[in-house]
Amino acid sequence: MAKTNEITKKRSFKKVSIYIALIIFAIINAYPIIWMAINSFKSEKEFATNQFGFPKKFIVENYTAAWDIANLGVLFKNSIFITVTATVLTVFIGALASYFLSRFDFKMSKWLYGFFIFGLLIPIHATLVPMFILMKNLGLLNTPITLLFPYIAFHLPITIFILTSFMKGFPKDIEESAIMDGCGVFRIFWSIILPMSRPAIATTVILNFIYNWNEFSFALVLINDPELQTLPLGLANFAGQFTTDYGAQMAGLTMSLIPIVIFYMIFEKNIVKGMTAGAVKG
């Protein structure tokens, strides 16, 4: 009995320690966001004298000033178009490729899968100059679809990796039953495989959305037209032009962060569910 109580105490202590560590980790990560949001309501004078306290007076005008000066309406529109389009195309292409790689046995399947996974090892920044030259030769610089190509290409490997690992765990009996009912290959993919892959698809959608929304390097190199710039690039230029107006800077950064935080909070359970399911089934 004493030994059982000792084991229970050790488990409780371990559980409490883990929770304390996680709480500390959460506070460390959340503090910069909270600090930024608080300072977005301060005047320039108050920001200079009191950077870590609450504002004496909440200046909402910082948000309207940031919206107008930084042209956030256009930046939001461009980011939403690029992010949503690239995410949808990447996940659809990745799901289709994963379906054939995981459910069909053909001669080059392992080599083809390895080719896609090799893309995870390519450093993105090493491709900026070749990508610029390629886009320039193709006449695709400063167009609404310029960023779609690198975004799709560089996020297909992780998408295919997650979806292939997940789809490999499906029993073959499902497809055999569907074929007996007269379903073709693409009907099986669309009506059976995709619905069953929802947890993994949700994971890839979230990862793609966050990456595309926050991406800066390709936008900086491939886009020069202010009317086509995405939110990270536009905010960087805004911060460079108005280095003393920290309240407006914080307001602009806070507004850019709100959509991604809301999106993540809504779907964050799917990340864990999709990752763990894919790891177990793969």
Image (tube, helix red, strand yellow):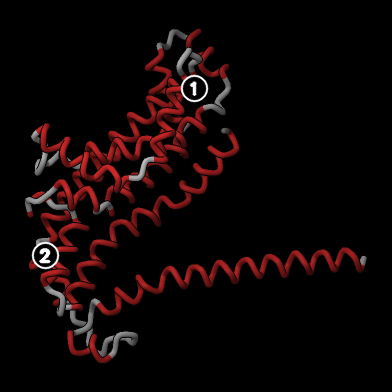
Q: Secondary structure at mark 2?
A: loop
Could you tell me the amino acid type at mark 2? Ala
Q: Label 1 belongs to which residue?
A: 110
Report whether 99 appears left or right of 227: right
Is the N terminus in the top left, top right, bottom left or bottom right quadrant? bottom right
**Residue 213 % position (x, y):** 27, 51
- Vertically, is 66 above or below 218? below
Q: Nearer the viewer, residue 210 or 149?
A: 149
**Residue 21 % position (x, y):** 58, 69
Question: What residue occupies the far right of the structure in this picture?
Answer: 1
Report whether 200 appears left or right of 57: right
Report whether 165 appears left or right of 79: right
Identity of the residue drawn at 54% across and 19% down: 174
On residue 8, the disc is none
Q: Tell me if mark 2 has few (under 14), some (14-19) or many (20+) residues whose alpha carbon lies within 10 angstroms of its own.
A: many
Q: Label 2 belongs to which residue?
A: 70
Identity of the residue drawn at 66% across and 69% down: 16
Report whether 198 appears left or right of 69: right
Query: How many labels, in total?
Result: 2
**Residue 184 % position (x, y):** 40, 11
**Residue 149 % position (x, y):** 23, 36
